[in-house]
Amino acid sequence: MVVSEKTLKWGLCFYPPLLFQRIWVKRFHKDFRGVDVKINKSLFNKNYNGSIFGGTIYAATDPFYALLFDQLLQRQGFKVRVWLKSASIQYLKPGRGDLFFTITVNDDMLNEAIEALNTVGKFVKAYPMEITNSQGELCATVMNEVYVRNLHQGEEPRIAY
């Protein structure tokens, strides 16, 4: 479903798995070329040593590459199914305060996906993410592998809910 940047931002801000872990979408960039996300430290996501629970950090990174590629490719006329195929995280420093990350999708990334969808019908690629604290210190790195299937090449679309 094609939606506006503001509609998706507010939908995700109040989506219970993100809301209750205090994961806040600050904004989607124009034309879904990126997203800025904040993980607010709170009583609900603090572990026993006072830092943000690792599962919250991991969960915060889960949906965004898939959402960006989904919106971008739909706007290019594709009918796609997109999901996070795999992910890995490396914790480098405890998140003792709020954490932040930004993801961007540039023309090369989008064109590579379009080329793969037009030739082989699917696109699979891993992209890095960096999670920093308010001082700009790197607290975690993540690799998210995105899977995109061109539904114009056989698979029947289904509503997931």
Image (spheres, helix red, strand yellow):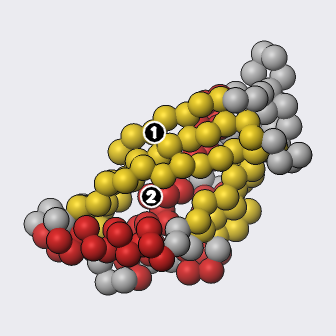
Assign the N terminus to one quadrant of the image. Answer: bottom left
Q: Nearer the viewer, residue 43 or 147?
A: 147
Amino acid type at circle 1 is Ala
The residue indicated by pointer 1 is 87
Which callout, 1 or 2, points to the residue nearer the camera? 1
Q: Residue furthest right?
A: 135
Number of numbered markers: 2
Name the residue located 73 percent from the left edge and 36 percent from the top edge.
139
Amino acid type at circle 2 is Ala
Residue 47 sits in quarter: top right
* For residue 73, above or below residue 59: below
Q: Nearer the viewer, residue 56 or 118?
A: 118
SS at mark 1 in the image:
strand
The crowd level at tag 2 (other Cα within 10 Å; few <14, some 14-19, many 20+) is many
Of pointers 1 and 2, the one earlier in the residue sequence: 2
The residue indicated by pointer 2 is 66
SS at mark 2 in the image:
helix
Residue 149 in the image: state x and y as whole percent: 25, 61
Name the residue located 17 percent from the left edge and 71 percent from the top edge.
119
Residue 94 in the image: state x and y as whole percent: 77, 28
Q: Is residue 97 left or right of residue 65?
A: right
* For residue 104, above or below residue 135: below
For the residues marked 1 and 2, what is the alpha-carbon distance in whole angstroms? 12 Å
Residue 36 in the image: state x and y as whole percent: 69, 61
Assign the C terminus to one quadrant of the image. Answer: bottom left
Q: Nearer the viewer, residue 21 or 93?
A: 93
Name the residue located 83 percent from the left edge and 48 percent from the top edge.
136
Q: Is residue 159 left or right of residue 37?
A: left
Q: Is residue 52 left or right of residue 142?
A: right
Name the residue located 75 percent from the left edge and 29 percent from the top edge.
93
